[in-house]
Image: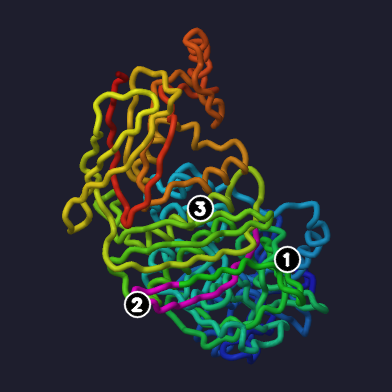
């Protein structure tokens, strides 16, 4: 029905599911037409009339419920205006504005979905292990994205999280405050239930994660023609052309609340693809499901017991601001559930994230049971490991060079009892002077957590071609070394293309390894992140003006050789010794 035929006082019928799969009809009254609700767009103001609808009032999950006058569809319930309402008023998106979505679907090949560059220096720093990963690295991009579109009067979509530990969800709950998405601890039947057929008034879910853990937003189908459906009446994330799994859903119950009622749902089987996410609703097609990223995780306890979890994550590129957070909370929940505890232990991680181009980013590392952070806080091994994994994924997913989708993610966590960390106390050598080609013995004393100090020794060789009159030996743990390198050679950590970014991540240092470097004084520069060492003294000053303009970075020393030695704990700290040539 055209909007200009709708008059105040008309009685209309709306359809939605309050419980199970049963579509129920309820009466609403046309209050008025809300012209220019958004620039150039209108809304229809309605009042709920039927007893059940009045009792629950404006309800999360009701978005998309179709409204009819004399059997003619006028639009979808999409807006609510206040909490703690005494008068159950809601807003309806006119069906004509929803049907415009098909015009955009017809030109989807000429348009790109939302793509935000949420990759930051802080995320790369955490991915490389230079700093512990805090929650804000993953929650701030979601807050930023949600703040980019007007959602002040949109009826909330319940985004339900099932299979997650309470601890993993604490940082997530506040993200969606004051947005069009409400956080709900929901349920999933792993795709085994039969939700109602996708028809007007039935529940419909947009799936972000499916399997042993589940994340999905539930709304209502507005319109269907053949295999095409419209729903929600407002955006999900407002990302434009998308490919998101579309699933059936069953409503367990509608929880009435004085503040804002909400439908509690179970996500059913995936039956197609959501292809448009627009201001006036979502559009989907029943049929093949879109590509998803299989994620497998395994936890091996101290007694050898193995626990596995499997889930599939939406591959949609426009959700790259959210996917690293999803992976992190899923991994945390799996570890905490398998371990049945959150106390101290050390985790040895092996695994990889495979890219569709065939490359494989290794995620192997070692995480002790305690990692200090700013503000007199700390990360246990679960938070530390999952944070660095998520930072690696975010560095790839949100890179500014080229889209590189993942094809699979596979991670194994092996638990080791206790806190396997140590502090480097002192280093010394068996000589105070050296000659080119000499073999030197490096001694280093470390203090393991709650154990006696231990002295280790390793042999290193001075290159026979060494010509400098002195050498500096640096020795320390992975985190301390990466921090020092980032401070002394910042250009190395600013990749110019995706290949450089991937290689940088792939070469990240491992926490259970001890590093010894032979360093010489040198006149060199970094052009981009490429080093040009050993410049003649007559040439080096010529680069100073370019360095002042930020075109390149000067370097006064160079790493000639590096040795790596494995240990059964993470060593923190870095020290140096200088020797003179004989």
How dense is the environment of label 2, judged by Cα within 10 Å: few (below 14), some, or many (20 and up)? few
Q: Residue at x 78, y 67 (%)?
A: 99
Work out which quarter of the rendered image holds the C terminus and state it: top left
Which label's residue is closer to the chain start, 3 or 2?
A: 2
Residue at mark 3 to residue at mark 2: CA–CA distance: 30 Å
In the displayed structure, would residue 37 be above or below residue 228?
A: above
In the displayed structure, would residue 372 be above or below residue 537?
A: below
Q: Position of residue 247 (x, y in %)?
A: 66, 78
254 left or right of 289 in image: left
Q: Which residue is mark 1?
A: 275
The magenta segment = 299-317
Front in this rendered view, residue 131 or 323: 131
- Camera-near label (1 vs 3) is 3
SS at mark 2 in the image: loop
- Camera-near label (1 vs 2) is 2
Q: Is residue 178 visible?
A: no
Q: Position of residue 173 (x, y in %)?
A: 42, 66
Residue 453 included in the magenta stretch of the image: no
Give the colour scheme shown: rainbow
Residue at mark 1 to residue at mark 3: CA–CA distance: 28 Å
Q: Is residue 27 visible?
A: yes
SS at mark 3 in the image: helix
Q: Which residue is mark 2?
A: 303
In the displayed structure, would residue 440 be above or below residue 344?
A: above
Q: Which residue is mark 3?
A: 392
Front in this rendered view, residue 294 or 359: 359
Q: Which mark is residue 490?
A: none
Front in this rendered view, residue 558 or 126: 558
């Amino acid at each position: 029905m055209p909007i200009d035929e709708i008059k105040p006082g008309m009685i209309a019928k709306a359809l939605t599911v309050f419980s199970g799969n049963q579509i129920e009809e309820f009466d609403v009254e046309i209050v008025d037409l809300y012209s220019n609700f958004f620039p150039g767009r209108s809304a229809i103001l309605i009042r709920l009339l039927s007893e059940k609808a009045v009792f629950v009032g404006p309800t999360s999950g009701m978005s998309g419920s179709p409204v009819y006058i004399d059997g003619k569809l006028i639009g979808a319930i999409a807006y609510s205006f206040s909490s703690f309402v005494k008068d159950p008023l809601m807003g309806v998106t006119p069906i004509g504005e929803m049907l415009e979505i098909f015009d955009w679907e017809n030109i989807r090949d000429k348009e790109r979905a939302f793509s935000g560059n949420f990759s930051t220096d802080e995320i790369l720093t955490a991915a490389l292990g230079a700093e512990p990963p805090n929650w804000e690295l993953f929650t701030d991009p979601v807050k930023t994205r949600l703040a980019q579109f007007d959602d002040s009067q949109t009826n909330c979509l319940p985004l339900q999280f099932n299979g997650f530990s309470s601890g993993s969800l604490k940082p997530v709950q506040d993200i969606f405050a004051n947005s069009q998405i409400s956080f709900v601890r929901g349920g999933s039947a792993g795709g085994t239930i039969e939700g109602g057929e996708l028809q007007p008034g039935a529940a419909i879910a947009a799936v972000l994660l499916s399997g042993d853990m589940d994340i999905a937003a539930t709304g209502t189908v507005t319109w269907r023609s053949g295999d095409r459906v419209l729903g929600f009446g407002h955006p999900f994330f407002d990302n434009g052309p998308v490919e998101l799994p579309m699933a059936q859903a069953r409503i367990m119950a509608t929880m009435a609340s004085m503040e804002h009622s909400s439908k509690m749902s179970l996500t059913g089987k995936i039956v197609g693809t959501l292809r448009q996410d627009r201001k006036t609703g979502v559009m989907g097609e029943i049929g093949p499901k879109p590509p998803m990223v299989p994620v497998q995780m395994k936890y091996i306890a101290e007694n050898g017991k193995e626990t596995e979890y499997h889930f599939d994550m939406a591959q949609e590129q426009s959700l790259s601001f959210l996917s690293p957070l999803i992976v992190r909370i899923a991994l945390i929940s799996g570890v905490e559930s398998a371990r049945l505890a959150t106390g101290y232990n050390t985790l040895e991680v092996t695994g990889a994230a495979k890219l569709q181009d065939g490359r494989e980013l290794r995620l192997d590392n070692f995480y002790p049971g305690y990692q200090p952070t700013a503000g007199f806080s700390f990360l246990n091994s679960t938070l530390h490991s999952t944070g660095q994994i998520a930072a690696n994924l975010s560095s790839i997913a949100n890179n500014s060079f080229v889209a590189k989708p993942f094809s699979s993610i596979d991670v194994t966590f092996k638990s080791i009892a206790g806190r396997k960390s140590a502090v480097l106390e002192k280093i010394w050598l068996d000589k105070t002077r050296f000659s080119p080609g000499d073999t030197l013995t490096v001694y280093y004393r470390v203090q393991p957590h709650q154990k006696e100090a231990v002295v280790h020794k390793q042999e290193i060789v001075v290159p026979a071609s060494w010509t400098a009159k002195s050498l500096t030996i640096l020795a320390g743990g992975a985190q301390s070394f990466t921090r020092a390198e980032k401070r002394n050679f910042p250009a190395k950590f600013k990749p110019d293309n995706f290949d450089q970014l991937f290689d940088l991540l792939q070469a990240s240092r491992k926490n259970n390894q001890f590093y010894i470097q032979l360093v010489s004084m040198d006149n060199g520069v970094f052009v981009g992140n490429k080093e040009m060492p050993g410049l003649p003294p007559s040439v080096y000053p010529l680069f100073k003006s370019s360095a002042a303009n930020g075109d390149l970075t000067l370097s006064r020393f160079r790493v000639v050789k590096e040795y790596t030695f494995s240990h059964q704990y993470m060593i923190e700290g870095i020290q140096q010794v200088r020797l003179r040539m004989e």
